[in-house]
Amino acid sequence: MHLIDGMNQKPMSLWRLRLAAFGFGVLALVIVFGITQVYSNDVRLIYGSGAVFFFLAAIWLARRKEDWLSATLLIAPLLITFCFLVLVEVSFLWPHLLLWSATAALGLIFLRILRRRRGLTIVLTAVLVVTSLVYCEWYIPLKLTRKFNRFADSSAPIFSLQPVSGGAVPVTPTPGRVLVIDFFSTTCAPCIAELPELAAVQADLKNHRDIEFVIAASDLGSDTPDRFRAFIEGRHINIPLAFDADGKAHDSFGLHGVPAMVVLDREGRVRLTRLGYNSAETGFRRDLVQFLKSL
């Protein structure tokens, strides 16, 4: 009787472990995407927070039992959600899935190989860390830049914006001047994340009086001129503000969504359009400054 009871307890214990692993996986999903909503949309932060959580959770699982199905259940919720919410739009982030899986696998065997082959543990950990650093600091920024930027040399549509802030506000192209229009919404998290970087670009070019900046919101969402002005002023951004009624100017450039940026050269021709922003694009400020100086 005792033998039968003991045989029945092991599968139950194992399935409880697997259930706990799945629960940890759901927790990882909540933490990772919660961080992006509250703190930053940086896709490197999504990877890093997930990797650390998976590694530590897999070590905890391995202390109970080295079970590969548990590890699979641990990473499944985040991997599946990431595929449906992120990869459908940004397919080049597929290494997130591979590296998260590798991190969980390393965590699951970490204690065992640490006791038996410490050198191998160091090598495997170092390889994963170096690969992650290259991925986050080189691959992701490069791919984001290529995705967001569209260089051109085409005629611009006729458009006009409504001034919102005081002082001189560029609402149409001026011959002999470069114009940077950033289409914005107060309810758009990437738009808000981009604001400090755009302000830094303007500051870097403060001696270039022939380069003008304007941030334009529209009434397609919940924005009004007063709400928009108060929102920007509350963040101490000193870039001229304009309103794009019904989003006509935005649509005339063939843009979809915000943030979106248009750069017009001194002849009023479209030289650059940008669709989107992510804090992981580490070269945004440097590259935009260099490009504007070259026009």
Image (tube, rainbow, N blue to C red):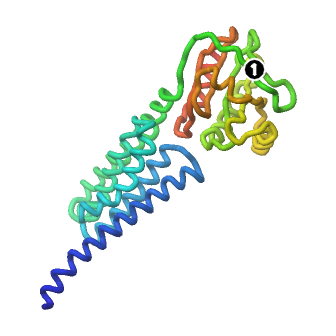
Q: Residue at x 74, y 14 (%)?
A: 177
Which quarter of the figure is the C terminus placed in?
Answer: top right
Circle 1: element type:
loop
Residue 7: quarter of image: bottom left
Q: Residue at x 17, y 86 (%)?
A: 5
Residue 239: quarter of image: top right
From the viewer's perspective, is 282 left or right of 111? right
Residue furthest toward the bottom?
1
From the viewer's perspective, is 124 left or right of 290? left
Q: Residues within 10 Å of mark 1 (few under 14, many from 20)?
A: some
The x, y position of residue 126, in whole percent, is: 34, 49
Residue 131: quarter of image: top left
Which quarter of the figure is the N terminus placed in?
Answer: bottom left
Q: Which residue is mark 1?
A: 160
The relative height of residue 12 versus residue 195 in the rendered view (above or below) is: below
The x, y position of residue 55, in whole percent, is: 37, 58
The x, y position of residue 215, in whole percent, is: 72, 30
Residue furthest toward the right?
167
From the viewer's perspective, is 137 left or right of 186? left
Q: Amino acid at mark 1?
A: Ser
The x, y position of residue 112, in whole percent, is: 24, 64
Count of all numbered marks drawn on residues in the image: 1
The relative height of residue 83 versus residue 295 in the rendered view (above or below) is: below
Q: Residue at x 60, y 19 (%)?
A: 291
Front residue of 185/120: it is: 185
Q: Residue at x 65, y 35 (%)?
A: 197
Front residue of 279/207: it is: 279
Front residue of 148/103: it is: 148
